Amino acid sequence: MKKIKAALMGGTGYAAAELIKRLIEHPNVDLVRISSIDHIGENVGQVHKNFLNRLDYTFEDLTPEQVAKDVDVVFLALPHKVSYLMAPKLFDLGVKIIDFSGDYRISDVKIYEKFYNTTHPNPENIPSFTYGLPELFREEIKKSSRIANPGCFPTATALALLPLAKAGLLKGKVRVIGPTGSSGSGVHPQAGTHHPVRYNNFKSYKPLTHQHQPEMKQVLEQAGGKELAVDFIPMSAPFARGILINTIVDLDPSVTEDEIFEIYENYYKDEPFVRHLGNKSLPEVIAVATTNHADVGWSLKEEENGSKSFVAIASIDNLVKGAAGQAVQNMNIMFNLEETASLTDFGQWP
Protein backbone atom coordinates (compact mmCIF):
# COMPACT_ATOMS: atom_id res chain seq x y z
CA MET A 1 0.00 0.00 0.00
CA LYS A 2 1.23 3.47 -0.89
CA LYS A 3 1.99 5.43 2.27
CA ILE A 4 0.04 8.55 3.18
CA LYS A 5 2.23 11.63 3.41
CA ALA A 6 1.58 13.75 6.48
CA ALA A 7 2.82 17.09 7.78
CA LEU A 8 2.45 18.85 11.10
CA MET A 9 2.07 22.53 11.89
CA GLY A 10 2.91 23.37 15.49
CA GLY A 11 5.34 20.67 16.50
CA THR A 12 6.68 21.66 19.91
CA GLY A 13 3.71 21.06 22.23
CA TYR A 14 2.90 17.98 24.28
CA ALA A 15 0.07 16.82 21.98
CA ALA A 16 2.41 17.31 19.02
CA ALA A 17 5.01 15.07 20.66
CA GLU A 18 2.41 12.35 21.07
CA LEU A 19 1.29 12.80 17.47
CA ILE A 20 4.85 12.59 16.12
CA LYS A 21 5.37 9.32 17.98
CA ARG A 22 2.15 7.85 16.62
CA LEU A 23 2.85 8.94 13.04
CA ILE A 24 6.43 7.67 12.84
CA GLU A 25 5.27 4.30 14.20
CA HIS A 26 2.34 4.12 11.78
CA PRO A 27 2.78 1.42 9.10
CA ASN A 28 0.89 3.41 6.45
CA VAL A 29 2.17 6.95 7.05
CA ASP A 30 5.27 8.91 6.10
CA LEU A 31 5.70 12.02 8.25
CA VAL A 32 7.28 14.46 5.80
CA ARG A 33 7.88 17.66 7.78
CA ILE A 34 7.23 19.47 11.04
CA SER A 35 6.84 23.23 11.25
CA SER A 36 7.02 25.52 14.25
CA ILE A 37 7.70 29.13 15.17
CA ASP A 38 9.69 27.94 18.20
CA HIS A 39 13.01 26.05 18.29
CA ILE A 40 13.57 26.63 14.58
CA GLY A 41 16.43 24.56 13.22
CA GLU A 42 16.60 22.32 16.28
CA ASN A 43 16.25 18.57 16.05
CA VAL A 44 12.93 17.25 17.38
CA GLY A 45 14.80 15.26 20.03
CA GLN A 46 16.25 18.42 21.54
CA VAL A 47 12.73 19.52 22.46
CA HIS A 48 10.90 16.22 22.92
CA LYS A 49 13.43 14.31 25.00
CA ASN A 50 11.90 10.90 24.39
CA PHE A 51 13.17 11.04 20.79
CA LEU A 52 16.75 12.07 21.69
CA ASN A 53 18.87 11.66 18.51
CA ARG A 54 16.75 8.92 16.96
CA LEU A 55 14.88 11.14 14.47
CA ASP A 56 16.12 13.30 11.61
CA TYR A 57 13.35 15.92 11.77
CA THR A 58 14.16 19.54 12.52
CA PHE A 59 11.63 22.24 13.27
CA GLU A 60 11.13 24.55 10.29
CA ASP A 61 9.47 27.94 10.06
CA LEU A 62 7.16 27.31 7.09
CA THR A 63 4.09 28.87 5.57
CA PRO A 64 0.95 26.74 5.37
CA GLU A 65 1.55 26.40 1.64
CA GLN A 66 5.06 25.07 2.25
CA VAL A 67 3.82 22.68 4.91
CA ALA A 68 1.18 21.26 2.58
CA LYS A 69 3.46 20.72 -0.42
CA ASP A 70 3.15 17.15 -1.76
CA VAL A 71 1.37 15.80 1.31
CA ASP A 72 -2.06 14.21 1.80
CA VAL A 73 -2.94 15.43 5.29
CA VAL A 74 -1.90 18.33 7.49
CA PHE A 75 -2.33 18.23 11.25
CA LEU A 76 -2.77 21.61 12.91
CA ALA A 77 -1.51 21.31 16.49
CA LEU A 78 -1.92 25.03 17.00
CA PRO A 79 -3.61 27.09 19.72
CA HIS A 80 -7.10 28.41 19.19
CA LYS A 81 -7.08 31.86 17.61
CA VAL A 82 -4.10 30.69 15.53
CA SER A 83 -5.68 27.76 13.71
CA TYR A 84 -8.46 29.93 12.32
CA LEU A 85 -5.78 32.06 10.64
CA MET A 86 -3.82 29.13 9.20
CA ALA A 87 -6.54 26.65 8.18
CA PRO A 88 -8.10 28.74 5.36
CA LYS A 89 -4.72 28.93 3.64
CA LEU A 90 -4.85 25.15 3.22
CA PHE A 91 -8.37 24.90 1.84
CA ASP A 92 -7.51 25.10 -1.85
CA LEU A 93 -4.35 22.98 -1.71
CA GLY A 94 -5.98 19.55 -1.99
CA VAL A 95 -4.99 18.32 1.47
CA LYS A 96 -7.08 16.91 4.27
CA ILE A 97 -6.97 18.87 7.53
CA ILE A 98 -7.17 17.67 11.12
CA ASP A 99 -7.32 20.65 13.48
CA PHE A 100 -6.56 20.27 17.19
CA SER A 101 -7.90 23.68 18.23
CA GLY A 102 -11.40 24.71 19.26
CA ASP A 103 -11.75 27.13 16.35
CA TYR A 104 -14.03 24.95 14.19
CA ARG A 105 -15.74 22.71 16.76
CA ILE A 106 -18.69 24.84 17.86
CA SER A 107 -21.34 25.34 15.21
CA ASP A 108 -22.80 28.54 16.70
CA VAL A 109 -20.15 31.19 16.15
CA LYS A 110 -21.69 33.51 18.76
CA ILE A 111 -21.25 30.87 21.43
CA TYR A 112 -17.70 30.22 20.25
CA GLU A 113 -16.85 33.92 20.40
CA LYS A 114 -18.33 34.24 23.89
CA PHE A 115 -16.38 31.36 25.42
CA TYR A 116 -13.13 31.93 23.51
CA ASN A 117 -13.25 35.72 23.88
CA THR A 118 -12.50 36.45 20.24
CA THR A 119 -14.09 37.32 16.90
CA HIS A 120 -13.91 34.45 14.43
CA PRO A 121 -12.46 35.76 11.14
CA ASN A 122 -14.02 33.12 8.88
CA PRO A 123 -17.15 31.65 10.53
CA GLU A 124 -18.48 30.63 7.13
CA ASN A 125 -15.92 27.81 7.16
CA ILE A 126 -17.10 26.24 10.41
CA PRO A 127 -19.77 24.04 8.73
CA SER A 128 -17.15 22.51 6.43
CA PHE A 129 -15.51 20.78 9.41
CA THR A 130 -16.74 17.45 10.78
CA TYR A 131 -16.62 16.97 14.53
CA GLY A 132 -14.11 14.17 14.90
CA LEU A 133 -15.65 11.87 17.51
CA PRO A 134 -15.59 8.43 15.85
CA GLU A 135 -17.98 6.88 18.35
CA LEU A 136 -20.70 9.22 17.11
CA PHE A 137 -19.69 10.48 13.65
CA ARG A 138 -17.69 7.65 12.07
CA GLU A 139 -19.62 7.68 8.78
CA GLU A 140 -19.36 11.45 8.45
CA ILE A 141 -15.62 11.31 9.17
CA LYS A 142 -15.14 8.79 6.36
CA LYS A 143 -16.47 11.33 3.86
CA SER A 144 -14.84 14.43 5.32
CA SER A 145 -11.69 16.28 4.32
CA ARG A 146 -11.69 18.64 7.33
CA ILE A 147 -11.86 17.43 10.91
CA ALA A 148 -12.30 19.46 14.07
CA ASN A 149 -10.59 17.18 16.56
CA PRO A 150 -12.65 17.21 19.78
CA GLY A 151 -11.46 18.69 23.03
CA CYS A 152 -10.23 16.40 25.80
CA PHE A 153 -12.96 17.18 28.35
CA PRO A 154 -15.80 16.93 25.77
CA THR A 155 -14.41 13.62 24.49
CA ALA A 156 -14.55 12.03 27.93
CA THR A 157 -17.92 13.61 28.74
CA ALA A 158 -19.44 12.44 25.47
CA LEU A 159 -18.14 8.89 25.92
CA ALA A 160 -19.62 8.80 29.42
CA LEU A 161 -23.11 9.76 28.21
CA LEU A 162 -23.42 8.95 24.48
CA PRO A 163 -25.34 5.68 24.97
CA LEU A 164 -27.81 7.40 27.28
CA ALA A 165 -28.33 10.26 24.81
CA LYS A 166 -28.77 7.93 21.83
CA ALA A 167 -31.35 5.95 23.81
CA GLY A 168 -33.38 9.12 24.42
CA LEU A 169 -32.79 9.02 28.18
CA LEU A 170 -30.64 12.14 28.56
CA LYS A 171 -32.68 15.22 29.39
CA GLY A 172 -32.32 18.36 31.47
CA LYS A 173 -29.41 19.24 33.70
CA VAL A 174 -26.02 17.55 33.19
CA ARG A 175 -23.45 18.16 35.91
CA VAL A 176 -19.82 17.46 35.01
CA ILE A 177 -16.76 17.44 37.27
CA GLY A 178 -13.41 16.64 35.70
CA PRO A 179 -9.93 16.42 37.24
CA THR A 180 -7.21 16.71 34.59
CA GLY A 181 -3.45 16.30 34.40
CA SER A 182 -1.00 19.16 34.06
CA SER A 183 -0.06 18.35 30.46
CA GLY A 184 -3.46 19.69 29.44
CA SER A 185 -2.26 23.18 30.34
CA GLY A 186 0.37 23.10 27.63
CA VAL A 187 4.14 23.18 27.44
CA HIS A 188 4.61 26.73 28.77
CA PRO A 189 4.22 27.08 32.58
CA GLN A 190 1.90 29.74 33.91
CA ALA A 191 1.17 31.01 37.40
CA GLY A 192 -1.73 28.62 37.94
CA THR A 193 -0.24 25.59 36.18
CA HIS A 194 3.42 25.69 37.24
CA HIS A 195 4.59 22.45 38.91
CA PRO A 196 5.21 23.90 42.40
CA VAL A 197 1.58 25.00 42.67
CA ARG A 198 0.17 21.76 41.20
CA TYR A 199 2.31 19.27 43.10
CA ASN A 200 0.53 17.96 46.19
CA ASN A 201 -2.39 20.26 45.31
CA PHE A 202 -5.93 19.85 43.99
CA LYS A 203 -8.12 22.76 42.93
CA SER A 204 -11.01 23.83 40.74
CA TYR A 205 -10.68 26.41 37.98
CA LYS A 206 -12.96 28.17 35.49
CA PRO A 207 -16.14 26.82 37.16
CA LEU A 208 -19.12 27.12 34.78
CA THR A 209 -17.08 29.22 32.31
CA HIS A 210 -14.63 26.75 30.74
CA GLN A 211 -14.51 26.92 26.92
CA HIS A 212 -15.25 23.19 26.61
CA GLN A 213 -18.65 23.52 28.30
CA PRO A 214 -20.65 24.50 25.17
CA GLU A 215 -18.84 21.81 23.18
CA MET A 216 -20.09 19.21 25.67
CA LYS A 217 -23.66 20.44 25.33
CA GLN A 218 -23.45 20.49 21.54
CA VAL A 219 -22.19 16.94 21.11
CA LEU A 220 -24.64 15.50 23.63
CA GLU A 221 -27.52 17.26 21.86
CA GLN A 222 -26.27 15.93 18.52
CA ALA A 223 -26.37 12.46 20.06
CA GLY A 224 -30.00 12.89 21.09
CA GLY A 225 -29.97 14.75 24.41
CA LYS A 226 -33.03 16.95 24.97
CA GLU A 227 -33.41 20.32 26.69
CA LEU A 228 -29.89 20.07 28.04
CA ALA A 229 -28.10 22.46 30.34
CA VAL A 230 -24.49 21.59 31.18
CA ASP A 231 -22.65 22.74 34.29
CA PHE A 232 -18.93 21.97 34.22
CA ILE A 233 -16.27 22.28 36.90
CA PRO A 234 -12.76 21.36 35.72
CA MET A 235 -10.18 20.51 38.35
CA SER A 236 -6.40 20.78 38.34
CA ALA A 237 -4.97 17.46 39.53
CA PRO A 238 -1.38 16.68 40.61
CA PHE A 239 -0.57 14.21 37.83
CA ALA A 240 0.78 14.79 34.32
CA ARG A 241 -1.61 12.82 32.10
CA GLY A 242 -5.22 11.82 32.27
CA ILE A 243 -8.81 12.97 32.80
CA LEU A 244 -11.45 11.44 35.05
CA ILE A 245 -14.82 12.84 34.04
CA ASN A 246 -17.72 12.44 36.49
CA THR A 247 -21.19 13.20 35.13
CA ILE A 248 -24.40 13.33 37.16
CA VAL A 249 -27.90 13.30 35.67
CA ASP A 250 -31.46 12.54 36.76
CA LEU A 251 -33.21 9.63 35.05
CA ASP A 252 -36.79 8.52 34.61
CA PRO A 253 -37.74 6.43 37.68
CA SER A 254 -38.74 3.51 35.44
CA VAL A 255 -35.20 2.95 34.12
CA THR A 256 -33.49 -0.12 35.60
CA GLU A 257 -29.85 -1.12 36.00
CA ASP A 258 -30.31 -4.01 33.58
CA GLU A 259 -31.64 -1.63 30.91
CA ILE A 260 -28.72 0.75 31.36
CA PHE A 261 -26.21 -2.09 31.21
CA GLU A 262 -27.72 -3.33 27.95
CA ILE A 263 -27.79 0.20 26.46
CA TYR A 264 -24.11 0.79 27.21
CA GLU A 265 -23.02 -2.73 26.31
CA ASN A 266 -24.75 -2.62 22.91
CA TYR A 267 -23.48 0.86 22.09
CA TYR A 268 -19.84 0.11 22.81
CA LYS A 269 -19.56 -3.59 21.96
CA ASP A 270 -17.92 -2.92 18.58
CA GLU A 271 -15.94 0.18 19.53
CA PRO A 272 -12.21 -0.58 19.44
CA PHE A 273 -11.17 1.95 22.08
CA VAL A 274 -14.04 2.20 24.55
CA ARG A 275 -14.15 -0.36 27.36
CA HIS A 276 -17.50 -0.61 29.13
CA LEU A 277 -16.91 -1.55 32.77
CA GLY A 278 -20.58 -1.53 33.76
CA ASN A 279 -21.50 -0.81 37.38
CA LYS A 280 -19.16 -3.33 39.01
CA SER A 281 -15.86 -1.52 38.34
CA LEU A 282 -15.11 2.17 37.96
CA PRO A 283 -12.64 3.86 35.58
CA GLU A 284 -9.18 4.90 36.75
CA VAL A 285 -6.74 7.26 35.08
CA ILE A 286 -3.72 4.97 35.28
CA ALA A 287 -5.53 2.20 33.39
CA VAL A 288 -5.76 4.34 30.23
CA ALA A 289 -2.79 6.69 30.63
CA THR A 290 -0.55 6.83 27.51
CA THR A 291 -3.18 4.94 25.45
CA ASN A 292 -6.06 5.75 23.12
CA HIS A 293 -8.50 3.77 25.25
CA ALA A 294 -11.39 5.14 27.27
CA ASP A 295 -12.93 3.33 30.21
CA VAL A 296 -16.59 3.97 31.03
CA GLY A 297 -18.46 2.93 34.17
CA TRP A 298 -21.60 4.06 35.97
CA SER A 299 -23.80 3.84 39.05
CA LEU A 300 -27.56 4.17 39.51
CA LYS A 301 -29.25 5.18 42.77
CA GLU A 302 -32.92 5.38 43.67
CA GLU A 303 -33.71 8.39 45.85
CA GLU A 304 -36.24 8.49 48.69
CA ASN A 305 -38.68 10.48 46.53
CA GLY A 306 -38.65 7.76 43.84
CA SER A 307 -36.42 9.62 41.38
CA LYS A 308 -33.19 8.08 40.15
CA SER A 309 -29.74 9.64 40.10
CA PHE A 310 -27.24 8.37 37.56
CA VAL A 311 -23.49 8.84 37.58
CA ALA A 312 -21.40 8.00 34.50
CA ILE A 313 -17.63 8.13 34.76
CA ALA A 314 -15.05 8.07 31.96
CA SER A 315 -11.27 8.06 32.02
CA ILE A 316 -9.01 8.97 29.10
CA ASP A 317 -5.48 10.17 28.47
CA ASN A 318 -5.86 13.85 27.58
CA LEU A 319 -2.95 13.75 25.10
CA VAL A 320 -3.97 10.53 23.34
CA LYS A 321 -7.72 9.88 23.13
CA GLY A 322 -8.16 13.53 24.14
CA ALA A 323 -5.92 14.85 21.34
CA ALA A 324 -3.25 13.14 19.22
CA GLY A 325 -4.52 9.56 19.39
CA GLN A 326 -8.01 10.61 18.39
CA ALA A 327 -6.49 12.64 15.54
CA VAL A 328 -4.70 9.52 14.27
CA GLN A 329 -7.91 7.52 14.67
CA ASN A 330 -9.70 10.13 12.56
CA MET A 331 -6.94 10.01 9.93
CA ASN A 332 -7.23 6.24 9.74
CA ILE A 333 -10.97 6.50 9.15
CA MET A 334 -10.60 9.29 6.56
CA PHE A 335 -8.10 7.30 4.51
CA ASN A 336 -9.85 3.94 4.90
CA LEU A 337 -7.00 2.47 6.93
CA GLU A 338 -7.27 0.06 9.82
CA GLU A 339 -8.86 2.28 12.47
CA THR A 340 -6.61 0.99 15.23
CA ALA A 341 -3.31 1.40 13.34
CA SER A 342 -0.59 2.83 15.59
CA LEU A 343 -3.01 2.97 18.52
CA THR A 344 -3.08 -0.55 20.01
CA ASP A 345 -0.30 -0.26 22.57
CA PHE A 346 -0.93 -1.16 26.20
CA GLY A 347 -0.67 1.50 28.84
CA GLN A 348 1.27 1.59 32.06
CA TRP A 349 0.35 -0.32 35.21
CA PRO A 350 0.96 0.91 37.80
Image (cartoon, rainbow, N blue to C red):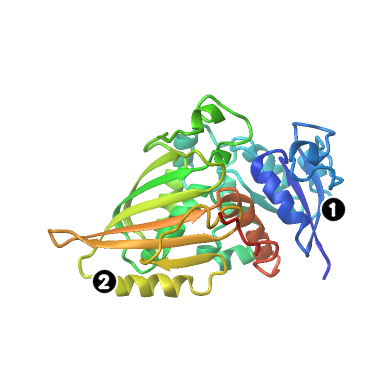
Q: Quadrant of the C terminus?
A: bottom right
Classify 10 Å Cα crowding around label 2: few (below 14), some (14-19), many (20 and above).
Answer: some
Q: Position of residue 117 (x, y in %)?
A: 49, 31
Q: Quadrant of the N terminus?
A: bottom right
Residues under numbered marks 1 and 2 in contact, where contact means CB atoms less than 8 Å apart: no
Q: Residue at x 44, y 58 (%)?
A: 283
* Residue placed under numbered mark 1 in the picture: 70
Q: Is residue 183 visible?
A: yes
Per the image, label 2 sits on a secondary structure element best described as loop
Instruction: Give the foreground label among 1 and 2.
Output: 2
Give the mark nearest the N terminus, 1 or 2. 1
Q: Amino acid at mark 2?
A: Thr
Question: As drawn, which residue projects farthest toward the top?
Answer: 191
Question: As drawn, which residue projects farthest toward the front?
Answer: 350
- Image quadrant of residue 165? bottom left
* Residue placed under numbered mark 2 in the picture: 256
From the viewer's side, name the closer residue of 258 and 239: 239
Q: Residue at x 37, y 75 (%)?
A: 262
Q: Is residue 91 visible?
A: no
Per the image, label 1 sits on a secondary structure element best described as loop
